[in-house]
Amino acid sequence: AQRVTQPEKLLSVFKGAPVELKCNYSYSGSPELFWYVQYSRQRLQLLLRHISRESIKGFTADLNKGETSFHLKKPFAQEEDSAMYYCACQGGSEKLVFGKGTKLTVNP
Amino acid sequence: GAVVSQHPSWVICKSGTSVKIECRSLDFQATTMFWYRQFPKQSLMLMATSNEGSKATYEQGVEKDKFLINHASLTLSTLTVTSAHPEDSSFYICSASSPTGWLQETQYFGPGTRLLVL
């Protein structure tokens, strides 16, 4: 069964600083990886998925199969990026498994 | 597009009563809907997966007789918490996906329902 680890519960950076939210997964095959974001008092929403290779709101994430990681990065954090971020992994036809989330706070 | 709604957004009930939560896909047909439970400061835990017109598939440890799921149409799934007890108090979130077209099996989440059982 797949497992997702987000080692940081809380992450605080200053506006304009680079930010990296870590995510490691364990799955024997080739999973699909996602980042979901939940802004304050809003629903969970998809930020990006590795298969689409998009950059959303300045965020990017690269799947590193060697390190089994899918870290989320943004070169210049903005205050509006403050939110809960969940990494998720889906292997084949299996269920979507979420990490415990990282709360990002971007300070002015 | 791809909006999922839940009703009610919060509910308070007495122990022993049953509570029904609705999940609707507003602008797409969801062949599959998922029900999650989220405890405070915890991640989302999948409870069950339901496909339209068939019985739900429950995750290990989830009592199917307690958490009744019905997916009668392509836009509506319901979760009924039967004989609710205080330990059932939680945040219940549904999501919906469609395997066709541009949605490409991405799950779209509802806003969640906060259940408090007294």
Image (tube, coloured by chain):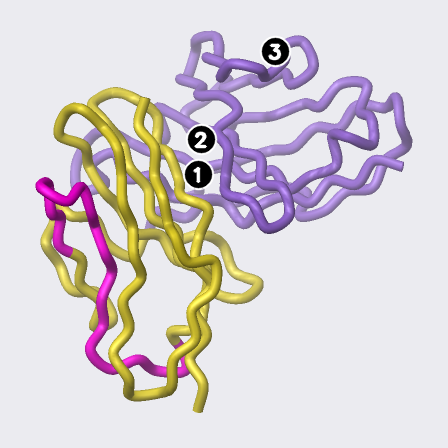
Chain colours: A yellow, B purple
Residue B26 included in the magenta stretch of the image: no
Residue at (50, 17) in percent of width and height: B72
Foreground label between 3 and 2: 3
Foreground label between 3 and 1: 3
From where the camera sits, is residue A108 visible? yes
Q: Name which residue type carries label 3.
A: Lys
| Residue placed under numbered mark 3 in the picture | B64
| Residue placed under numbered mark 2 in the picture | B75
The percent coordinates of residue A54 (x first, y second) are 13, 59
- Evaluate if marks 3 and 1 touch, with contact meaning CB atoms under 8 Å apart: no
What's the mark number on residue B25? Answer: 1
The residues tagged by marks 1 and 2 sit, at their Cα atoms, a distance apart of 5 Å
**Chain of residue at mark 2:** B
Crowd rating for badge 2 (residues with CA inside 10 Å; few <14, some 14–19, many 20+) = many
Q: Which residues are magenta?
A: A62-80
**Chain of residue at mark 1:** B
**Chain of residue at mark 3:** B
What's the mark number on residue A55? Answer: none
Element marked by disc 2: loop
The lab-note entry on whether marks 3 and 1 share a chain reads yes
The lab-note entry on whether marks 1 and 2 share a chain reads yes
Residue at (63, 41) in percent of width and height: B39
